[in-house]
Image: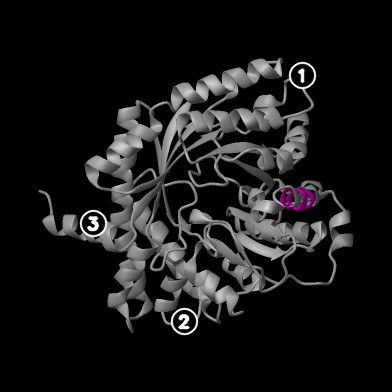
Amino acid sequence: MINTGSIFETIEMIDKQHLDIRTITMGISLLDCTAEDPKRCCERIYDKICRKAEHLVQTGCDIENEYGIPIVNKRISVTPIALVAGGCDTQDLVPFALTLDRAAKSCGVNFIGGFSALVQKGVARGDELLLRAIPQALAETDLVCSSVNVGSTKAGINMDAVAEMGRIIKQTAHLTADNSGLGCAKLVVFCNAVEDNPFMAGAFHGVGEADSVINVGVSGPGVVYHALQSCKGAPFDAVADTVKKTAFQITRMGQMVAAEASRRLDTPYGIVDLSLAPTPAVGDSVARILEIMGLEVCGTHGTTAALALLNDAVKKGGVMASSHVGGLSGAFIPVSEDEGMIASATEGTLTIDKLEAMTCVCSVGLDMIAVPGDTSAETISAIIADEAAIGMVNSKTTAVRVIPAEGKKVGDMIELGGLLGSAPVMPVHQPSAAEFIARGGRIPPCRV
């Protein structure tokens, strides 16, 4: 029997509480596109993406119109290009990024992810070429996103790759300085990267996935915030139960959309990623959820505990609603994309050190953080190493997406636009970690 009360609740969530499907992402395997001739390989990549994703955007729009559910983004993720292009007779992988960009524009999607490499244990030829190409590739494309996995719980942390990523981020910031370092907003450094993440900039299509698959990312910070209005003064048991029930409702909607998109596109249904992914819009903030639990400002003492409760309850509610919950599923804390985080960082309560502590208990890591333009590559590498260590030791996915803002100092703002929002430039520690980063080698996996 249809529960009319639930229908009206969902309508209210969509209409007034910023509930949406953040993305429908089609993952596409490019393993059958390999060729020794790089031009032939690029042609195969372009043809397969366009063939598989030809109707993705239209299908998303049709579902959006028929069901009245906002679907903000339609995206594509592909097999890490380092794997696909590694056997090509070429020294330059920038043309592969241009091919991905051209295919994404032909399909009409918002972003395409997978200009990626997995180097947690070592760097193969394709990985080396891809790392070398990242800055130019991100500077010359509009829709391409890149990710590099530098560590894992089983392999440890590849500190040579960590050192290289610091330099790559600095170069990417320089090449896109006229656009507020936008290239760095499309570049993520992971530990324990997952193969079915639908969210950018870290999405890629893992080798264990089907030839093509539909993954859906749902977001609803505003819905959770609204639900917790009724829990003021209640014990944390009641808060957790309320979040779980809300997450259940959100996930059911995401599963319905994923199944419908899968049917219409004749593509297997992969996962629903229930991540509370905020936007710069007022009322769509993870920080404000933490504050309604009783914190005066996000970032003050107690923030990590509040975030731990939120992340756990979101995951439990999602798992109750669907047997196909995957991706990252939890609470994101991207500074530039969250109105409450921006406010807390601007007034100084939310610092990078506090954000690092929060990443021990949330979905991903240090996300969309602007730092002064004169921050050294070694300092950025050290930030990556710290975050990778948290992921490795705790067997969780962690990531760093940091933007060295050329010409900017602490307290300045950078404008990235759209869902990427704006970010206050945050201070980093001045004492050097250069000697630490220069050691290289591999930090062994920690067993705790």
Q: Amino acid at mark 2?
A: Leu
Answer yes or no: is residue 119 visible.
Answer: no
Q: Residue at x 88, y 55 (%)?
A: 438
Q: CA distance from mark 1 to mark 2?
A: 57 Å
Q: Amino acid at mark 3?
A: Thr
Where does residue 264 sit, x and y in percent of width and height?
30, 29
Tell me the residue that label 1 is attached to: 89
Rendering coords of residue 404 (x, y %): 71, 59
Q: In this rendering, would 137 be left or right of 235?
A: right
Task: Tell me if residue 170 is in the magenta stretch.
Answer: yes
Q: Which residue is mark 3?
A: 10
Q: Is residue 43 magenta?
A: no
Which residue matches tag 2?
295
Q: Nearer the viewer, residue 149 or 281?
A: 281
Viewer-nearest of discs 1 and 2: 1
> Label 2 to label 3, Cα distance in Å?
28 Å
Q: Residues within 10 Å of mark 1 (few under 14, many from 20)?
A: few
Furthest toward the left, the residue is: 1
